[in-house]
Image: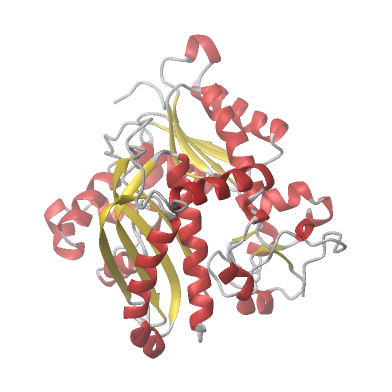
């Protein structure tokens, strides 16, 4: 067992909503919802009313009629994330990014340079607050799993530490849902066997857990209940896929709206791929229906690509094949992934006498990098009512077109 709790899990609090409150002082202290359709993020003032991410906007407004609803500003969130991760990387040479707003840091061996892990975590939170203006919660432990559990328990804007040797004592009274990877379905299985706390799971043998939740989940939960998590904080690991998804409220969604969402997701994913110099051959469409069932469909292309139009064409074909099922069962989530990745070798596309897709994509990327993601929009998005950058339309002075 390590002699110190050297792993920090750092997690920004209500990230999108916190950025909005940082940039608009009139929103501070008020319940804020990001996303007019489906809740993408909710401030802690809004969460006090029971509002959660992925909740339908109508339900959220019923729970808190006086909540302030704001549209998402992805450019602002990306900028804030980059600033925060620059602080992470200044803090430790070993940073593992989990998402746009959270990461693991391994601070082992930095005691003589930067102080104890607790000192480092406190300084990290202070610097993020002072330099970026955002609240950050952190957990410090000997394992990645427990550090993540602690950061969640520390929210909002807190810090929790468990010293070596005290891990199982801390875990024992926690509900099973706190274990990493326990979702509603797994929790329900455990509850049916009167297993409601981590301590109760820890009393079972691995074979007993496997019989309840399956081999992979049973082995993992048995290990985590005893704080056995040998995973190291890793940096620079090879990426296996690029993906994005959009949650939607219940019923009915017009075909043109689903197409607009597909266009938006394809643009977002392929732009990120091009920024990383990656291409992919397999395009995956993921759907969640109103009855909570899911479907995954995929198509493998003749060659690896990062072309927005090629990926979009594949996605549209997959979506068209599911139209009847969508009409019958409704849809609440649409997601895409491009996998089977390769490095972009820069090979010219044929025919050479026409403007290449790569050249068009590159030009669009440069405009968006300079002026923001909404500086150029596909016609499908404008027709679907997606917001255009207001400054592109003279005389609007920041007012969205009706």
Q: From where the camera sits, is residue 173 visible?
A: yes
- Residue farthest to the front, as pictured: 353
Residue 251 picture location, percent across and down: 50, 85
**Left or right position of 12 against 387:** left
Q: Nearer the viewer, residue 82 or 200?
A: 82
**Residue 133: x %, y % from top left:** 72, 38
User: What percent of the width, then of the height, locates residue 2?
Assistant: 33, 23
Q: Nearer the viewer, residue 69 or 193?
A: 69
Can you see residue 50? no
Q: How many marks?
A: 0
The quadrant of the image that shows the N terminus is top left
**Residue, far left:** 207
Q: How is the image coloured?
A: secondary structure
State the residue in front, 378 or 42. Answer: 378
- Taking 45 as reference, is 199 left or right? left
Identify the image quadrant of the C terminus. bottom right
Residue 327, image quadrant: bottom left
The residue at 41%/20% (across/down) is 108
State the residue at coordinates (43%, 60%): 309
Outermost bottom residue = 328
């Amino acid at each position: 067992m390590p002699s110190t709790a050297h792993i920090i899990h750092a997690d920004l609090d209500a990230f999108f909503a916190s950025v909005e409150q940082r940039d608009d002082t009139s929103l501070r202290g008020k319940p804020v919802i990001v996303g007019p359709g489906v809740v993408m993020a909710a401030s802690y003032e809004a969460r006090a009313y029971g509002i959660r991410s992925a909740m339908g906007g109508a339900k959220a407004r019923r729970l808190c009629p006086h909540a302030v609803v704001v549209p998402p500003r992805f450019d602002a969130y990306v900028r804030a994330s980059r600033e925060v991760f620059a602080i992470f990387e200044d803090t430790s040479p070993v940073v593992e990014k989990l998402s746009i707003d959270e990461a693991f840091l391994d601070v082992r061996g930095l005691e003589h340079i930067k102080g104890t892990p607790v000192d480092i975590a406190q300084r990290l939170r202070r610097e993020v607050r002072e330099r970026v203006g955002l609240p950050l919660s952190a957990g410090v432990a000997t394992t990645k799993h427990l550090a993540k559990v602690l950061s969640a328990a520390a929210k909002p804007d807190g810090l929790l530490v468990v010293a070596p040797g005290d891990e199982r004592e801390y875990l024992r009274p926690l509900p099973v849902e706190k274990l990493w990877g326990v979702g509603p379905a797994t929790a329900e299985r455990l509850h049916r066997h009167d297993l409601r706390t981590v301590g109760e799971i820890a009393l079972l043998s691995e074979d007993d857990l496997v019989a309840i939740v399956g081999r992979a989940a049973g082995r993992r939960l048995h290990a985590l209940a005893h704080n056995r998590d040998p995973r190291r904080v890793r940096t620079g690991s090879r990426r296996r896929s690029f993906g994005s998804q959009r949650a939607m409220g219940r019923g009915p969604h017009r075909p043109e709206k689903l197409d607009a969402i597909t266009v938006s997701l394809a643009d977002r994913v392929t732009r990120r791929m091009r920024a990383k110099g990656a291409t992919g051959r397999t395009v995956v469409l993921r759907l969640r229906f109103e009855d909570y069932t899911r479907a995954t469909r995929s198509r493998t292309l003749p060659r690896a690509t990062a072309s927005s139009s090629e990926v979009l064409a594949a996605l549209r074909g997959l979506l068209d094949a599911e139209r009847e099922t969508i009409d019958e069962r409704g849809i609440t989530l649409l997601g895409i992934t491009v996998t089977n990745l390769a490095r972009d070798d820069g090979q010219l596309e044929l025919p050479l006498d026409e403007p290449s897709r790569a050249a068009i994509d590159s030009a669009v990327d440069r405009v968006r990098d300079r002026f923001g993601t909404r500086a150029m929009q596909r016609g499908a998005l404008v027709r679907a009512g997606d917001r255009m950058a207001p400054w592109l339309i003279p005389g609007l002075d920041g007012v969205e077109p009706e």
